[in-house]
Image (spheres, rainbow, N blue to C red):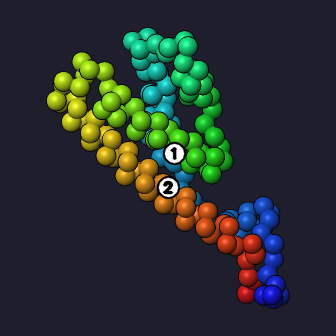
C-alpha cells in the first residue's frame, strides 16, 4: 500500500485556497450584452414558431432557457454540452422541414453551423474526459 505521508485530503476549503493563487479574467461585457439580446429576441422566435403543447421536452427546454444560468462551472459545462447535443440533433438534415431542405444557401449555413457545433462539442467532451480522469485518479495532493 502506498504511503500517504505528506498528503492532505482534497476538501472544498483546500481547493478554494489552492485556486485562489490562479485568478481568472472576468467575462467580457459582450457576454452579458449578447445574452440580453438573445433573451430579447426569444419572444419573437416563439411567436413565429410556438412550442408544440404536447411536447413536454420542448416545454422543459423553454423553462430552462427562461431560468437563471447555472453558477457552478461543472454544472454549466454539462448544461452547455446538453444544449450543443440538442442543437446538433435539430441541425440534422432529417429534422429540417422539406421546404428548407431545398434551399441550398440555408443548407450550406446549417452545414457550417453543424460542423462548428460538432467541433466545439468534441473539444468540450475531451476537456471533460481529461478533467474527470484527473479527479477520479486523484484523491490527495502532495504538499512540498
Front one among 135 and 69: 135
Q: Is residue 77 left or right of residue 17?
A: left
Q: Is residue 144 left or right of residue 30?
A: right
Q: Quadrant of residue 6?
A: bottom right
Is the residue 23 above or below the residue 86 in the image?
A: below
Q: Which residue is labeled 1 in the image?
A: 81
Q: Position of residue 76 (x, y in %)?
A: 59, 45
Residue 44 showing in the rendered view: no
Disc nearer the start of the sequence (2/1) = 1
Question: Which quarter of the figure is the C terminus placed in?
Answer: bottom right
Q: Residue at x 55, y 65 (%)?
A: 130
Q: Residue at x 18, y 25 (%)?
A: 103
Q: Which residue is labeled 2 in the image?
A: 125
Q: Residue at x 62, y 51 (%)?
A: 73
Is the residue 46 above or below the residue 68 in the image?
A: above
Evaluate if marks 2 and 1 touch, with contact meaning CB atoms under 8 Å apart. Answer: yes
Circle count: 2
Amino acid at each position: 500500500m502506498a504511503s500517504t505521508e505528506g498528503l492532505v485530503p482534497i476538501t472544498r476549503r483546500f481547493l478554494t485556497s489552492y485556486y485562489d493563487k490562479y485568478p481568472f479574467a472576468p467575462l467580457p461585457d459582450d457576454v452579458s450584452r449578447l445574452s440580453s439580446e438573445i433573451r430579447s429576441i426569444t419572444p419573437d422566435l416563439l411567436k413565429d414558431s410556438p412550442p408544440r403543447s404536447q411536447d413536454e421536452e420542448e416545454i422543459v427546454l423553454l423553462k430552462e432557457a427562461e431560468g437563471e444560468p447555472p453558477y457552478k462551472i461543472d454544472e454549466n459545462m454539462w448544461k452547455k454540452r446538453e444544449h450543443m447535443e440538442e442543437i446538433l440533433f435539430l441541425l440534422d438534415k432529417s429534422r429540417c422541414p422539406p421546404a428548407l431542405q431545398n434551399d441550398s444557401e440555408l443548407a450550406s449555413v446549417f452545414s457550417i453551423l453543424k460542423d462548428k457545433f460538432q467541433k466545439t462539442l468534441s473539444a468540450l467532451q475531451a476537456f471533460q474526459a481529461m478533467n474527470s480522469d484527473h479527479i477520479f485518479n486523484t484523491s490527495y495532493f502532495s504538499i512540498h
